[in-house]
Image (cartoon, helix red, strand yellow):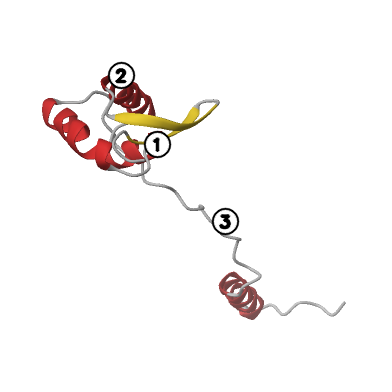
């Protein structure tokens, strides 16, 4: 190997190479994606008077009634929607079409 020059040029060259390497694509670290995050729903866990009145008025007129539709329309959680379905069934406002395990499909009691 040839002898190194005594001046500070080699340090300048090394620092320039390091700066170029850090700016290049190979020198930078991989940025892992954070993934998509869903917004957390803030659904009710109990009905208030207004929402309960809306439930008794609006839901029995729907063609298809499921736990998901009640939860979505009334902004309540699933367990409260299932209780609402039981309540509407006991009052005779809706009728059962299909019952499979925990899921059920219901419709208006007036429709054929």
Within-10-Å neighbours for mark 2: few <14, some 14–19, many 20+? few
Which residue is rendered at x = 51% and y = 53% of the image?
Answer: 35
**From mark 2 to mark 1, how far is it between C-alphas?**
16 Å
Quadrant of the image occupied by residue 44: top left
Q: Name the residue under label 2.
A: 90
Quadrant containing the N terminus is bottom right
The secondary structure type at the circle numbered 3 is loop
Query: Regarding mark 2 in the picture, which secondary structure is present there?
Result: helix
Q: Distance between the residues labelled 3 and 2?
A: 53 Å
Give the residue at x 30% y 43%.
62
Question: At 66% across and 70% down in the image, what residue appears?
Answer: 26
Left or right? Give the position of 99 relative to 96.
Answer: right
Residue 69: horizontal and vertical position, in percent?
36, 41
In the rendered view, does 43 fall on the left or right side of 38? left
- Identity of the residue furthest to the right in this view: 1
- Element carrying mark 1: loop
Along the line of sight, the residue nearer the viewer: 33 or 105: 105
Which residue is under mark 3? 32
Badge nearest the viewer, 1 or 3: 1
The answer to which of marks 3 and 2 sits earlier in the sequence is 3
How packed is label 3: few (under 14 Cα within 10 Å), some, or many (20 or more)? Answer: few
Q: Nearer the viewer, residue 78 or 53?
A: 53
């Amino acid at each position: 190997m040839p002898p190194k020059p005594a001046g500070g040029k080699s340090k300048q060259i090394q620092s320039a190479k390091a700066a170029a390497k850090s700016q290049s694509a190979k020198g930078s670290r991989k940025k892992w994606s954070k993934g998509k995050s869903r917004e957390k729903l803030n659904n009710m866990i109990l009905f208030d008077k207004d929402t309960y009145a809306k439930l008794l008025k609006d839901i029995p007129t729907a063609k298809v009634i499921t736990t998901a539709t009640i939860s979505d329309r009334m902004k309540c959680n699933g367990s409260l929607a299932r209780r609402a379905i039981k309540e509407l069934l006991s009052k005779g406002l809706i009728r059962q079409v299909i019952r499979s395990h925990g899921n059920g499909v219901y419709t208006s009691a007036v429709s054929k």
